[in-house]
Structures are given as structure tokens and as C-alpha cells.
Image: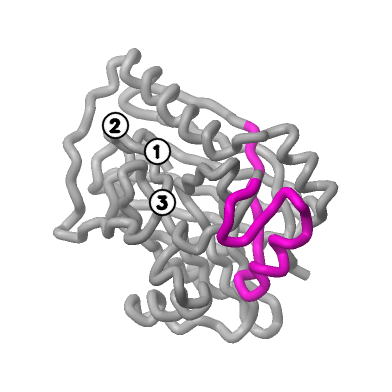
Amino acid sequence: MISSGLFVGTLRHRRFSPVRHAFTYPIFMALLDIDRLPQLMQVSRLTSYDRWNWASFHNPDHLGDPSRPLRERLAADAASHGVDLPNGPIFLLTHLRYLGYGFNPVSFFYCLDAAGDVRIVMAEVSNTFGGTHNYWLRPDPSARTFRSAAAKSLYVSPFLPVDLDYNFALSAPDDRLVAHMDARRDGAVCLDATLSLERRPWSAREIRRALIRHPAMTAGVVAGIHWQALRLWWKGVPLVARATRHGVGERAAQGRRDQPLGESLKEF
């Protein structure tokens, strides 16, 4: 049965063209029942809801009007994309803010039906200059696992064009969680990224252990983005002008705070 928790493991990136480039980082993320956010953030003295702490959840860090409940905002965005949400719990896999600093290259909303099965996933992708795009993913009915595809619609990395196609393979966030994405151009895989995570209980003890090991997780994510970008530049990978695909523009992160400055250098 899916429930809130910490997920600890690794993020692996592999680039295949125009040069080969790969890295793996340790990472942890929070999986949160969006209907119980205030209660969940009271589990530890180190966590807070909509206020500063070592780890905190802030509503402006996600889609829509932060004064409305997150489920309402998600339902409104789903309706605007012609998606009917199932009638079960919704779990958000995301980075919290750490020491007041937050950045999420991608957050996943797992939308379950009444039986507890994942029916829809929304990938909320952000770049480092405040743009976001929501990819509503429906599973391929012919696949045994949750597989879905979407056209890339947000300029994210200055080393990648926008005219790519994403392919997702996602497991349910149970005892283990795998989220795999590859980006393709004309059918050829340019890069892939894989989250491989294991569940830990959502408890004060596990939260403390994670924070001691990674005291500023999101700052580390942004530092890694820029370090890998420097390595790609050193390898001679050409820059791609910022653009959007087929007139589909990114939306600004209205009302969001603490967005890092500079060009987006993340490939996921």
C-alpha cells in the first residue's frame, strides 16, 4: 500500500550524443499525501509547513494559486489539459525547501484510483529561470508497466534542443521507486535519466538522518547542475538558443520564491 515516506537512492544521467557523458549522484526526496501536508510536516521539529525550517513544504513552490488547496489546483490544471483525475489519493514526489532554499527540476504527482493503483502521473518540470511545464502522463494500455510519452515543451538545458520527445517508465512509489526518462530526436536516444530510490518511513528519526547526510539537498542539486554544465562545455558540446516548441511557451512560476538565477543547465 502506497503511503507517505522518504525515498533515498541515486539519480543517474547518461548523455549519448554529441559526446558521451554520465554521472550519478546520491539523492533523497519526499513522497507526500497532498491531502495531509500540514500534518505530515508536523512529524519532526525540523520540518514545517509554509514557514522556514531546516526542511519545509511551501505551497508557492508548486502549480497554481498557492492560497488554494493543492488538490484543487491539480484538478484545475488537469481539467485544462482534458484529464479526469481518478478518485483516490494523490502523492507528490518532490524536493522540499532546505534551509529556505528550494528548487525542483522535476516533481511527480501520482494520482491513484480508489483501489490504490496509479492511473495518471503528472510530471511538473521546472527550469532555473522560473519557467515550468506540466506533462500529464497516461499509461500505454499495451505496456505491462506505466509507460508514457510526451513532446518536450520547455527549454530546460542550453545543451539540448526543444524538439525532442520524452519517454517515461515509472514504477508505483511502493517499497522501491524507479522513474526513468529518455529524450529522443528522430527516434534516437540523446540522453536518459533514472531515479532509483528505496522507501524509508516518514518519521522524525529518518528525516533527521537524511538531513544530516544531505543538509542542503536542493543547493547540492543546483551546484551539480552547474558543475555538469561546465564539464559539457569543456567537452565542446555546443549551446542551443532558448526556444519553445511549436509555439508552446513555458509559464512563469507566478508567486514562487527563492528561484535560482541563471540559465537552466539541468538535462531532466
Circle 1 — which element?
loop
Circle 2 — which element?
loop
Q: Is residue 144 magenta?
A: no
Task: Measure how far apart labels 3 and 1 are at the Cα level.
Answer: 22 Å
> Where is 96 relative to 40, above or below?
above
Type of the residue with mark 3: Arg
- Compare residues 172 and 111 and report the one nearer the observer: 111
The disc at residue 257 is: 3
- Say left or right for 14 vs 161: right
Task: Measure how far apart labels 2 and 3 are at the Cα level.
Answer: 26 Å
User: In this figure, which residue is indicated by the disc labeled 1?
Assistant: 267
Q: Quadrant of residue 184?
A: top left
Q: Are marks 1 and 2 in contact (CB under 8 Å)?
A: yes
The disc at residue 159 is: 2
Task: Measure how far apart labels 1 and 2 are at the Cα level.
Answer: 8 Å
- Say left or right for 140 vs 156: right
The disc at residue 97 is: none
Q: Residues within 10 Å of mark 2 (few under 14, many from 20)?
A: many
Magenta-colored span: 26-53
